[in-house]
Image (spheres, helix red, strand yellow):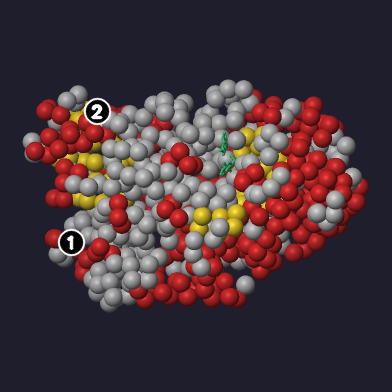
Amino acid sequence: MKKLILITIFALIAFLSACSNTPNVEDDDVDCTIEPTHEDCTDDPNDYPVEPTNPLLDPSYEYIDYNEAFDQDHYDQIMVEVEAILHSLTLAEKAAQMVQAERGSITPAQVRTYGVGSILSGGGSHPSSYNDSADVWYDMYEAYQDAALESGSGIPIIYGIDAVHGNNNLYGATIFPHNIGLGATNDPELIYNISKATAEEMLTTGINWTFAPALSVVQNIRWGRTYEGYSENPMVHDRLTYQAIAGFQDAGVAATAKHYLGDGGTYNGIDQGNVIVANDIVEALHLAPYLEAVKADVDTVMISYSSINGVKMHGHDYWINDVLKGTLGFKGFVISDWNAIHQLSGSFEYQVEQSINAGVDMLMEPSRWQETIQAIVNNVNNNKITEERINDAVSRILYIKFKRGLIDDPYARLSTSYLYNQEHQDLAREAVRKSLVLLKNDDNALPLAKDDTIYITGPGANNVGYMSGGWTTYWQGNNNADIGVGTSIYDAFYDVISSNGGQLVNNMTDASTVVVVLAETPYSEGVGDNGTLTLTSGNAHPDNTTALQIAQTAQANGKNVIGILISGRPLLLEDHLESFDAFIAAWLPGSEGGLGIRDVVFGDYNFTGTLAFTWPIDFAQVGYTSNEEDYDEDSVLFPFGYGLQYID
Ligand code: BGC
Ligand code: BGC
């Protein structure tokens, strides 16, 4: 443990000293990002707006030393009960506890016969239809739970789902910004509240296990999962991870720290690829958030599809057994990713053997769950896996089932009044405001006046589906403008403009301000891997091309041109930035994107978001991050920590 912490601290010091000669603090005593109204910050009219100082120097980035959440007495009490159950189980029943099936591939009758330990809904795997109500979800959950209680072991299932930005598979749930936006807020309390709200919306369906938060420390924005991570820099994870987990677990939902280990560090950002760096770098960059996760007493850890130096994580005895369960002292259970063990070598039975012996406790085998139970039993009978190892795995699973209250009350549920309630909408809107990063604001192009004459265009202008991105309604996201909840940018602007004497017009010529909303189309996982990253290729929306032409023409005609980019990562802006007087990175803001953007664009709130990712100038610079010891802020388009503000 000591060595790992030392390395993290060493890395921290390295970051700090690398940046200690950055001269943007105006005065020895005054930091204008903290005291923007201080006279030293406001007396020069050219200071409007100023760049905040690099957050690496900002005290708000300081490491927060949270308490160990683990409660030894409670653990000991539970383990007495776990022991008693464990001894009453047959080998087949134990093996079944170690298996997770997908709802589409298992019936309640099969749960009754086999007594599996867990069921999941994959991305977009609804009980029957995309707009199923919370009651329909609960009925499904209840039917499985009834069956589990009637099975031989009588042990309730734990049901897992990817509630990664709100309970995003449930129609009508609040959709919060994806993690890339939350990283830009750098606000641990906000992150706690979002996890808690997400947990409450999950519990309206009875489901109490989320496969979140992703703790990916993303080193290359080509990766399709970039937006699932908070930042390129583990300092941001150090601040946010504990609260992200505590928010779920305080509300009664089991969290999952994923994907262990190094998912964000694969060569060239290839999804499920290979991390090729020395172990001390793996520790400093990728293991760091897991120290926080274990401190927060996270219930489960999901293993990454990826490899470290050629060894698949799902068979990585050293990182799982020695480091996670040994050095870090993780007490919960380890789950494999979707069919991930199939990427190990040899027969299926051998894949099961390798992963369980490396420390995986539960196997996410969406459709081959029956075969998996048999493979575990065979491996024990053939002396490939010890009974002791099986007992350890099942104890961990039962421990979490007790800890989450499933054994005492498997039917617990919250009222559907929690769904998309006002409090959650307000919270999501606050998160949007705080996540926006103002990249450019020439001649105070922003804030806009509410009585302005505005033309809004571009593919992201009137589409809540695009603002929500992947893992919304469906695995690959929802392309519909109307996803049942939320307000588009167009609608949000329309309301404020029309009630303040302004006008939204239908063509550029009549407008004094032109707002161009560029977008990526939704994607998740490897589908989003992108080898070009421009505004007009790869996952970028094809209509960006026309929108950029409009921006250019508007600029040539002397209009005030505002750009808003809806995207899961920085995209290469090339020379397009010249067409805009102001430019905002809005990430994937979710259902309240329109209202949160409006709040800041019209000056009711200030911008506070800062880049948690380096914004590269060109493709050659992709992969260059603030983790470099000699990080040169001036060499990139916008450095880590950048973000403008209004100062009056
Ligand atoms: C993803 C995980 C996810 C799981 C279940 C996998 O493909 O990598 O992040 O939790 O599916 O949907
Ligand atoms: C599922 C996801 C899963 C993915 C893995 C999809 O069909 O819906 O949950 O992560 O497959 O490839």
Query: Hey, which residue is sitting farthest left in the picture?
Result: 557
Indicate left or right for 548 with 163 as reference.
left
Q: Residue at x 68, y 33 (%)?
A: 367
Residue 344 visible in the shown view: yes
User: Position of 541 compared to 132: left or right?
Assistant: left
Q: Residue furthest front?
A: 346
Q: Is residue 99 above or below residue 84?
A: above
Q: Position of residue 303 (x, y in %)?
A: 61, 52
147 is higher (above) or lower (below) than 158:
above
Query: Where ligand 1 lies, by image quadrant?
Result: top right
Residue 339 percent coordinates (x, y):
63, 41
Residue drawn 39% across the image and 26% down it = 481
Of the numbered discs 2 and 1, the one sitting upstream in the chain is 1
Q: Residues within 10 Å of mark 1 (few under 14, many from 20)?
A: few
Query: Label for residue 47?
Result: 1
Instruction: Tell me residue 490's x, y (percent).
Output: 30, 30
Q: Which residue is denoted by mark 2 in the rendering?
A: 498
Q: Is residue 627 shown above or below 455? A: below
- Report whether 202 appears left or right of 517: right
Label 2: how many Cα within 10 Å (few below 14, some 14–19, many 20+): some
> What kind of residue is marked 2?
Ser
Location of residue 603 by image quarter: top left
Q: Which residue shows up at 70% across the image and 57% down it?
A: 358
Q: Residue at x 37, y 71 (%)?
A: 629
Under mark 1, the amino acid is Asp
Local SS, label 2: helix
What secondary structure is found at the residue carrying circle 1?
Answer: helix
- Tell me where residue 119 sits by quadrant: top right
